[in-house]
Image (cartoon, helix red, strand yellow):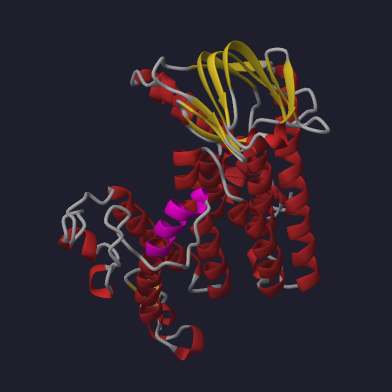
Amino acid sequence: MTALQDTYLGLPLEFWFTGPLGIPFHIWTVTMAITGLIVGSFLNVVIHRMPIGLSVVRPGSHCPACEQPIPLRLNLPIVSWLWLRGKCARCGVKISIRYLAVEALTGSVFLLTWLRFGPATPGVAWALCLLFSGFIAATFIDFEHLIIPDEITLGGIVAGFLLSAAVPLLHGVVSVPESIRASAAGIVVGGGLVYGVLRLGKWLFGRERIAVPPEFKVTFHESGLVLPTGEVSYEDVFYRDSDAVTAQGRRIELADRCFIDQSVRLELRRTPPVLKVGDETFEATDQPWMSIETDEVVLPREAMGFGDVKFMAAIGAFLGWKAAVFSLFASAVIGSLVAVALIGLGRQKWTGRLGYGPYLALAAVLWVFAGRRILEQWLGIPPGM
């Protein structure tokens, strides 16, 4: 046979007739696309429930407005949303188009990943689909809540390390010990790089002032504070012992008392954590809730949150240290382009409302599909480096 006869539609004949477990590859392709849609439906549950501390398993799918359980026939990815025109079948409340977008995106990602990596390395394709699922969940959660849950970041580190042992080709090697070393190096370098950026940002930048509308109350609870720009985790605010959130409150309400026209200072890295309201000092852990009417809240400023450190470590666990380095620098370029675009569109206020996680995720995806080619062809870096 000639080379031309060994292909069909630009793909080798083996693609169409053989695949894992002896199943035809085009059957695997359809299966992966459908699997992606189903996973996308589950990711919608994760995106909605995980940031607010709800179980992603129980209860089953239901309308958030009327709490009516959604039967399987009305819970089909994409099809049900289109059939119901984006509304609950019972109460008619609109269902966010985000549900449709996540399902379509996940299905497309699974399909493209399988077509790119499945013919030669199906194990790599499956591992990457898991990684990209985490990216999708993290991106949408970060957009809405400016946090990346530990279940995704720490879980990603563990999953990436274990999959590196199970699928050494994920790091381009065939030796399990070599793959494990590559994953470990990725965790250390990836997390260490962002940790260094975080510390540098803390040192270079002082404080960030958040303007508060007159009708808005800034709320402090056990795990974070709610600002006009969204909810912020304490983990992403307090890093050094000297870090403090400050405000001048017109009215400050604690669980058991109220203050008028007093300063507020919260220092959670102290031992014990300290809350100062005017001349009074409290142990912060004894005050589970506080609301403030104020014109401005001053936060410790940082280049990234600690959640991004763990997120980058997870990327390194799956893809290795080179991917981590590439993702850090590529994400900076992507973030800059997005900022310029938003400013050009007159939406510069949005630049402060976007987490950094989505940029890291997009940069890592760019590495998977084109990163090595960029290093070799655009930057002139030899393949072995």
Q: Position of residue 368 (x, y in %)?
A: 55, 54
Taking the view exactly as shown, the residue that stands out farthest to the top is: 261
Q: Is residue 239 left or right of residue 263?
A: right
Q: Position of residue 377 (x, y in %)?
A: 58, 44
Q: Quadrant of residue 261?
A: top right
Can residue 135 be seen here? The reply is no
Q: Position of residue 149 (x, y in %)?
A: 58, 49
Q: Nearer the viewer, residue 199 or 300?
A: 300
Residues drawn in magenta: 41-52
Q: Nearer the viewer, residue 187 or 266?
A: 266
Quarter of the picture containing the N terminus is bottom left
Q: Is residue 222 left or right of residue 38?
A: right
Q: Position of residue 280 (x, y in %)?
A: 72, 18
* Total marks in image: 0
- Magenta highlight: main SS: helix
Q: Is residue 284 above or below residue 294?
A: below
Q: Is residue 4 above or below residue 266?
A: below
Residue 263 sits inside the magenta stretch: no
Residue 43 sits inside the magenta stretch: yes
Taking the view exactly as shown, the residue that stands out farthest to the right is: 271
Q: Residue at x 37, y 60 (%)?
A: 108
Q: Residue at x 21, y 50 (%)?
A: 93
Q: Nearer the viewer, residue 159 or 333?
A: 159
Q: Is residue 257 above or below residue 55?
A: above
Q: Quadrant of residue 378?
A: top right
